[in-house]
Image (cartoon, rainbow, N blue to C red):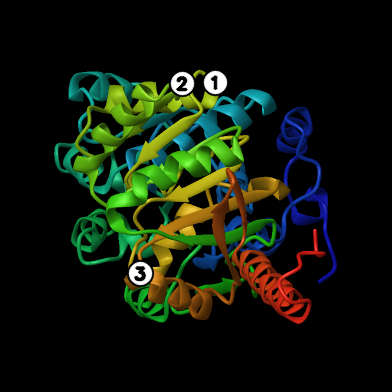
Amino acid sequence: MNEKNFVQLGISPALQKGLNSIGITIPTQIQQQTIPPILKGTDVIARSETGSGKTFAYLLPLIQNIDLELRKTQIIVITPTHELASQVQKQIELICEASEIPVKSALIIGSASMTRQIEKLKQKPHIVVGSAGRILYFIQHKKITAHTVKTIVLDEGDRLLDDLNRDSVKAVIKTTLKQRQLIILSATITQQTIQKANEIMKPDAINITMQNTSVPKEISHNYIVAERRQKFVMLRKILSAEKPQKAIVFLNNAENIAVTVDKLCYHGLKADGIYGKAYKTERQYAIEKFRQGNIDILVSSDIGARGLDIEGVTHIINIDIPEEPSYYLHRAGRTGRKGQKGKVISIVTPYEVKWIKKYQKTWNISFEQKEMSFGNLIDSTNVKKQISYTKNLKNTKKQYIKKNKGGNHYE
């Protein structure tokens, strides 16, 4: 594919200036593929690896197409988590401020103050970012004018079109005019998701899939086998051996997060946790501490697997592994972002090794089995070679001693 710059893609001088000021000069592959059709108003469904620049792939053309004179909501961005919505909102503010484009936006999510959100909506934002349920509520109560919406974005479309979220998402879409543009993006879009998307997208929608890019090559994938009751002990050993600059530790059960954080802090480690039922302000506080380096370890449920774009995350450690391959991919995608190196280490029981094989097959990635040896995390194959070498050495020594009638001339 011939690489194009932002000028060739049709991005305005103002946005180009803003991109340059924040250090972005070359469009990523997904941006090169999606910006032209989005600028034209075409429906797009796109899949690309985590950390590949998907957010700007849709924000840049959509911001450029906003009618600044029309003080009505023109773009709705729906996300499956509050954290991702907040991240998108920050990206909007970043590029608009850098480009000196007076676009107004509002973050509309559940668990936040409705009074404050109503005040934001009174300012007539051009872009509304948030959760489907809360956005639908405000549309139904005439706080958002749906008929002026030109584009709806489903960020992490696979989650938004699953059984849990699909009805509320489709309800939002139905409130808008039929000619509105629909954009669906994710790192994981299955054939089932495409079938669901086709029900709500125009017939001429473009399907963009970046081949073999679901898992960034900068990420190494590793696993270590331990009994379930020994998993926390193994976590401590891994943290001691690897000394990560920033690590996100994932658990499946949110109820175990606080206990894990307490144990880590007890052992002198700087940690905090986030999970769905925690207050939004508590989650934001923990994330900001992690972002700013006040803590080294963030313990999370899968709520942190999407939308957390934090620089310097060197390690992902799965105490519990997800049975669904797409969740593994999104967890892994919190490291190895923007070309940086990253490492994923999964602590698995002998029974759970089968899930590692499932990930290998689904995403065409290779895993290395690791073991702890004298405080270091090393390849299991090296351990086996060392054990084999030691056994052979002992056998050779015994044979030598026997041959020399017990005389130990070996040492």
Residue where numbered disc 2 is placed: 289
Q: Quadrant of the N terminus?
A: bottom right
The type of residue carrying mark 2 is Lys
Residue where numbered disc 3 is placed: 352
* CA distance separating discs 3 and 2: 33 Å
The type of residue carrying mark 1 is Gln
The residue lying at 56 percent from left, 60 percent from top is 370
Label 1: state its secondary structure: helix
Q: Quadrant of the C terminus?
A: bottom right
Q: Nearer the viewer, residue 7 or 109?
A: 109
218 left or right of 245 in image: right
The residue lying at 21 percent from left, 22 percent from top is 113
Whether residue 67 can be seen here: no
Residue where numbered disc 1 is placed: 292
The residue lying at 27 percent from left, 19 percent from top is 119
> Could you say where residue 351 lies in the image, as x and y percent from the top left?
32, 72
> Could you say where residue 195 lies in the image, as x and y percent from the top left?
36, 80
Marks 2,1: beta carbons within 8 A: yes
Q: Quadrant of residue 16?
A: top right
